[in-house]
Image (cartoon, grey):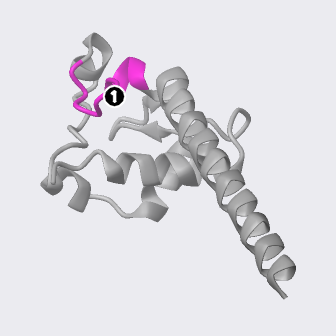
């Protein structure tokens, strides 16, 4: 009777380890996408304190009020389709060709995680 319990415990341990490594890999992938596609304007910390971010008046995503100013759907749409100012000038290029839907959704969650606690 002990053998099946030991086998079950080992399988559970292997599954938990695999889950931890896959979650770590996913988090690394999101951060990599942020650094590659977003940080040049939004800054690594989400503050928008880059030369381009200041030029475009990028919001500080660490600020709760800034985060309240948009929905996840609006953020996802901006990532996928880009953004334009009131005069119709492109202020953010679209990333639909570079990011999958899941990657774009992960970036929205990443932005939400930048909010100061």
Measuring from the top left, give residue 40's x and y in whole percent. Answer: 40, 17
Q: Give the residue number, with chain letter if any, for mark 1.
A: 42
Residue 36's place in the image compared with 34, above or below, is above
Looking at the image, which residue is at 80% across and 82% down?
2
Is residue 14 highlighted in magenta?
no
Q: How many marks?
A: 1
- Asked whether residue 80 appears in the rendered view, the answer is no
Residue 49's place in the image compared with 58, above or below, is above
Looking at the image, which residue is at 37% across and 64% down?
71
Q: Secondary structure at mark 1?
A: helix
Report the predominant secondary structure element of the magenta stretch. loop
Looking at the image, which residue is at 46% across and 51% down?
108
- Asked whether residue 44 appears in the rendered view, the answer is yes
Measuring from the top left, give residue 109's x and y in whole percent. Answer: 45, 54
Task: Give the camera-side residue of 116 and 61.
Answer: 116
Measuring from the top left, give residue 27's x and y in whole percent. Answer: 54, 42
Q: Quadrant of residue 1?
A: bottom right
Task: Give the camera-side residue of 111 and 86.
Answer: 111
What is the crowding at mark 1: few (fewer than 14 residues within 10 Å), some, or many (at least 20)? many
**Quarter of the image where the C terminus is located:** bottom left
Residue 37's place in the image compared with 94, above or below, is above
Residue farthest toward the front in the current orientation of the protein: 2
Residue 34's place in the image compared with 72, above or below, is above
- Which stretch is magenta? 39-49
Q: Quadrant of residue 46?
A: top left
């Amino acid at each position: 009777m002990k053998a099946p319990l030991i086998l079950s415990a080992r399988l559970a341990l292997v599954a938990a380890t695999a889950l931890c490594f896959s979650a770590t890999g996913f988090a690394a992938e999101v951060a990599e996408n942020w650094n590659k596609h977003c940080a040049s304007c939004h800054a690594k910390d989400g503050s928008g304190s880059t030369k381009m971010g200041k030029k475009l008046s990028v919001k500080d995503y660490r600020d709760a009020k800034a985060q309240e100013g948009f929905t996840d759907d609006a953020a996802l749409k901006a990532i996928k389709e880009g953004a334009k100012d009131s005069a119709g000038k492109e202020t953010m290029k679209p990333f639909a060709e570079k990011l999958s839907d899941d990657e774009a959704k992960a970036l929205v969650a990443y932005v939400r995680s930048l909010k100061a606690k």
